[in-house]
Image: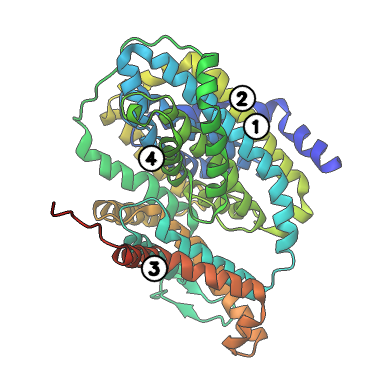
Amino acid sequence: MDPIIQGITLILDPYNLLLILGAVIMGVLVGALPGLSSTLAVALLLPFTLQLDPIPAIAMMSALYCAGTFGGSITAILINTPGAPPAVATALDGFPLAQRGEAGRALGIAAVSSVAGGMFSLLIFIVATPMLAKIALSFRPQEYFALALFGLSMLASISGKSSLRNLIAGAFGVLVATIGIHETTGVERFVFSIPELIEGIGFVPVLIGLFAMAELLNQSSKLDSAVERVKSIAIKLPSMADFKLIRWTVARSAVIGTFIGVLPAEGSTVAAIIGYNEAKRWSKNKAEFGKGAIEGIAGPETANNAATGGAMVPTLALGIPGSGTTAVILAALMVHGLRPGPYLIQNTPHFVYAIFTAMFIANVLFLILGLPGAKLFARITLIPRQFLWPSVFVFSMIGAYALNQSLFDVWVMLLSGVLGFFMLRHGFGPAPFVMGLILGRLVEENWSRAMIIFDNNFLRFFESWIVDLFFVLTIMGLFGPFLFRQLNRLMNKMKPQGRVSGD
């Protein structure tokens, strides 16, 4: 009980509560702004938390993560412009419902569903994280190598236009992770006589460049775009009839979202899409979807918020990010001198309960603030983008410089931004690149250690059933979709053709 009480007490400190409140407000505002996302906001926030202790710093980021995921639903419903990628599915039924004069009802369902999904995933988070960490304590370098490789294979299914492009972006991130001195051999790689590259490319400037600067350049072509707005908003909670209609949708999507969040490299966008599809599949009113079905709001909103708690499980217990935003949080843990993984849970168990408490408070706060303040938050979209994005540019420059007071990091951030812009233009998402950058170091480090232990005999990897399991999952992650498509085609060919009567 001592770690639980200690963790909760740390967060209930008035100063930390104030930080969480600020993070929630910031998260809802950022989520409501089209083009901005919680990943971008967390990346920008990271350098400004360096003066804080690790627990309040990570608590702020976790709270912002939760609130930002919900904030995207506000503009998705009111102006048919998802503030964040996970809210794309919410707009399909949220905006038509708002156009019918029921914007308040839509917002109420979104808020309640978001909190329900978030709370369910937090219960799984607080139970599963210590259990998974205990299992991971028995992992050796070969198991960690296989686990990280499995995480990389999951990039094929992360949100994006093309599985192949996601894998290419992830592979390029792994390549960038090899820059610097090899920890085992001491050999310099891709340094090109530049002293700043000896220790490798820093996470923070790359993250800021890929998520902030790249989006800034991408949004520069949309400065004059106009959006349709819902003018009348009377916020109200769902009725008992609404609750009765969506109760099974919420329960199902909470489980789906949490499971998707726990999977390495997935995230809330994938969860939201699956949540919406499953809500439609099981609904008795399929014809209403796309026209203002409340199940079409409850499904994705429950799932994408459930994915936030689920994504924190592998991030803290294994050091494997569960989403793009948790990849940034994982980098923040490293910057603050913490080593994510089972030893973090074993040595500082109060840390898990502190983060749980922070995310719990964040869910309660965005429900309290989100309902009455939705109309006010929606007005943030009136800020001209000509003023908004230059502000993002300034914060990006400050954030990149603040970590090491190095102009080299600023150049890395700018180059990462240009790279991210061209990646977006050609269908390569930044999230797979970041995953590759983080997991690449884990793959290389544990591969080198395992090969030393095995005296360079690769076949000894297969002596562990855990390694064998992860290798099978990796193969399924890479080739499973293709194999299933081929199997379906074969089954369709084998089906007997119907006879046409000639009479």
Kind of residue at badge 3: Leu
Q: Local crowd at mark 2 within 10 Å, few (<14), some, or many (≥20)?
A: some
Secondary element under disc 4, as helix, strand or loop, is: helix
Q: Which mark is residue 85?
A: 4
Residue drawn at 44 percent across, 49 percent down: 400
Q: Nearer the viewer, mark 3 or mark 4?
A: 3
Q: CA distance from mark 2 to mark 1?
A: 7 Å
Q: CA distance from mark 3 to mark 4?
A: 29 Å
Earlier sequence position, callout 4 versus callout 2: 4
Amino acid type, label 1? Phe
Q: x, y percentage for residue 456?
A: 59, 89
Q: Which mark is residue 360?
A: 1
Q: Amino acid at mark 2?
A: Val
Q: Earlier in the sequence, mark 3 or mark 2?
A: 2
| Residue assigned mark 2 | 364
Quarter occupied by residue 288: top left
Mark 3 or mark 1: name the one nearer the start of the chain.
1
**Circle 1: is it few (<14), some (14-19), or many (20+) Cα within 10 Å?**
many
* Separation (CA) of disc 4 from disc 1: 23 Å
Q: Against 48, is 489 above or below? A: below
Label 3 sits on residue: 483
In primary-sequence order, the first of circles 4 and 1 is: 4
